[in-house]
């Protein structure tokens, strides 16, 4: 499965994003860049959630994790059951089972009956990841997915996403401010600045990129 | 008296439900749609808040008058005509309050549900569910306006005993006759019904806190 776009042009609130080409498959593509560079806009445009010009191709079932997850009124478990039922069209019992499995996968079983809106930001990010995985997507769009997750929980969640993509061939696109995310999840990295791509190459070769943002990012090291 | 109260409740309940069914999709469109024409509908809802019931009653009475354009339907002075009038009067109120209720939810939620592939119909159902307490209040306000309304009920129903007499028109008639005990009894029942409706809405809202 692959996500790709050519000649993308998005105008949004006075900001212009212009990308000649960008693609992602199961090997993962990271979208890096300073705040306001257009990372989130690129992800939204690729999912078809924003009005954009250009030729965009994506699989029929996509799922996104937003940087600030919004959840439905109701328990964490119900949030997943409702989405699984409406997206997959499965029976309630089947949806309940998938929801339970997804909660296990993100280590949120203990909070299954908690009101989702009262979960901490990090727990809500876990729930949003579970909500994306529960629909068994063919493309995953992650926007700063682990920014608020506790440091010792991040490696397991990265492994979860990595394994899911490897197992299913799901395309992976990750906008992140974390070098560790890019290293762990994405073979390729794009660097955006001011709505333009300033670098496109293997994540492993980011050290050779002459860009102040990239140098600062790598100087922090692949912190957990 | 029981029949009059029952008709009041029936006409107002049906009108409220019809108005909700008509106004809610419009409200969802205003809050979550993309078209510029949304402002027109919101403007219509807002303008309709000040719609005088006698104007609605007049329009319906004129349209359904025996020699009027819709006279062949033979609906004037029936509960159906009253329901029609109340529905039109209540739509702007429920629509406006529903827009406010729906705007109370996280503005990003609609996009995030779309982002995991929830189809539009299910998405709208979930977004309406998010706003359930506010929508219950909107329905209560609509019911209150419908059951308390007298001008349109008089003009479209005609206050025919046993057929179209409701609590408000019965009260008017009683006062006109100088029958104050009858009028007080009608108003007491009317107030009692409002308390019952408020209690039902309160129970719904507490469940959804």
Image (tube, rainbow, N blue to C red):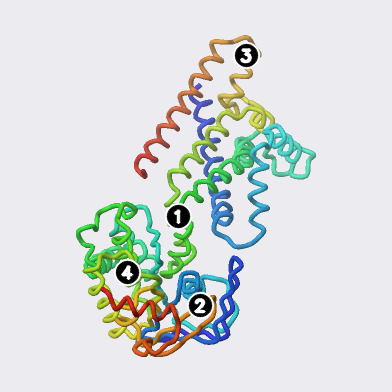
**Residue behind mark 2:** A193
Mark 3 falls on what kind of element? helix
> Residue A86, percent across and down?
39, 65
Tag nearer the camera, 1 or 3: 1
- Is A56 positioned to the left or the right of A29 in the image? right
Quarter of the image with the C terminus of chain B is top left
> Residue A157, percent across and down?
26, 73
Residue in the picture at 35% in, 72% down: A135
* Label 2 to label 1: alpha-carbon separation: 29 Å
> Residue B22, percent across and down?
57, 50
**Residue behind mark 4:** A146
Residue in the picture at 46% in, 61% down: B123
Q: Residue furthest right?
A: B67
Where is B94 relative to B58, above or below? below
**Residue behind mark 3:** B175
Identify the mark nearer the N-term, 2 or 4: 4
* Label 2 to label 4: alpha-carbon separation: 22 Å
């Amino acid at each position: 499965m692959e996500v790709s776009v050519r000649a993308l042009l998005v105008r949004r609130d006075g900001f212009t994003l212009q990308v000649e080409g960008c693609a992602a498959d199961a090997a993962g593509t990271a979208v890096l860049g300073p705040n306001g560079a257009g990372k989130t806009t690129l992800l939204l445009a690729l999912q078809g959630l924003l009005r954009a010009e250009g030729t965009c191709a994506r699989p029929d079932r996509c799922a996104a994790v937003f940087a600030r997850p919004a959840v439905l009124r109701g328990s964490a478990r119900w949030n997943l059951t409702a989405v699984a039922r409406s997206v997959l069209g499965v029976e309630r019992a089947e949806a309940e089972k998938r929801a339970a499995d997804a909660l296990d996968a993100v280590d949120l079983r203990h909070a299954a009956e908690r009101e989702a809106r009262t979960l901490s930001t990090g727990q809500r990010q876990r729930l949003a990841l579970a909500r994306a995985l529960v629909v068994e997507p063919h493309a995953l769009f992650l926007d700063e997915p682990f920014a608020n997750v506790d440091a010792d929980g991040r490696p397991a969640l990265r492994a979860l996403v990595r394994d899911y993509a490897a197992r299913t061939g799901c395309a992976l696109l990750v906008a992140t401010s974390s070098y560790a995310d890019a290293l762990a999840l994405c073979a390729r990295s794009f660097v955006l600045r001011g709505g333009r791509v300033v670098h496109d190459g293997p994540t492993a070769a980011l050290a050779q990129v002459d860009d102040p943002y990239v140098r600062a990012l790598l100087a922090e090291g692949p912190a957990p | 008296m029981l029949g009059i109260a029952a008709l009041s409740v029936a006409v107002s309940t049906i009108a409220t439900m019809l108005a909700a069914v008509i106004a809610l999709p419009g409200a969802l469109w205003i809050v979550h749609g993309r078209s510029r024409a949304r402002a027109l509908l919101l403007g219509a809802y807002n303008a309709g808040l000040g719609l005088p019931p006698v104007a609605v009653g007049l329009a319906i009475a004129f349209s359904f008058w025996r020699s009027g354009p819709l006279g062949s339907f033979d609906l004037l002075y029936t509960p159906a005509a009253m329901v029609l009038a109340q529905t039109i009067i209540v739509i702007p109120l429920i629509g406006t309050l529903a827009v406010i209720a729906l705007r109370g939810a996280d503005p990003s939620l609609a996009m995030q549900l779309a982002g995991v592939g929830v189809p539009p119909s299910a998405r709208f159902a979930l977004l309406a569910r998010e706003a359930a307490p506010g929508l219950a209040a909107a329905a209560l306000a609509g019911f209150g306006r419908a059951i308390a309304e007298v001008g349109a009920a008089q003009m479209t129903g005609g206050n025919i005993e046993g057929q179209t007499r409701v609590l408000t028109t019965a009260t008017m008639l009683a006062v006109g006759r100088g029958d104050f005990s009858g009028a007080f009894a009608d108003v007491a029942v009317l107030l009692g019904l409002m308390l019952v409706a408020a209690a039902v809405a309160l129970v719904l809202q507490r469940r959804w806190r």
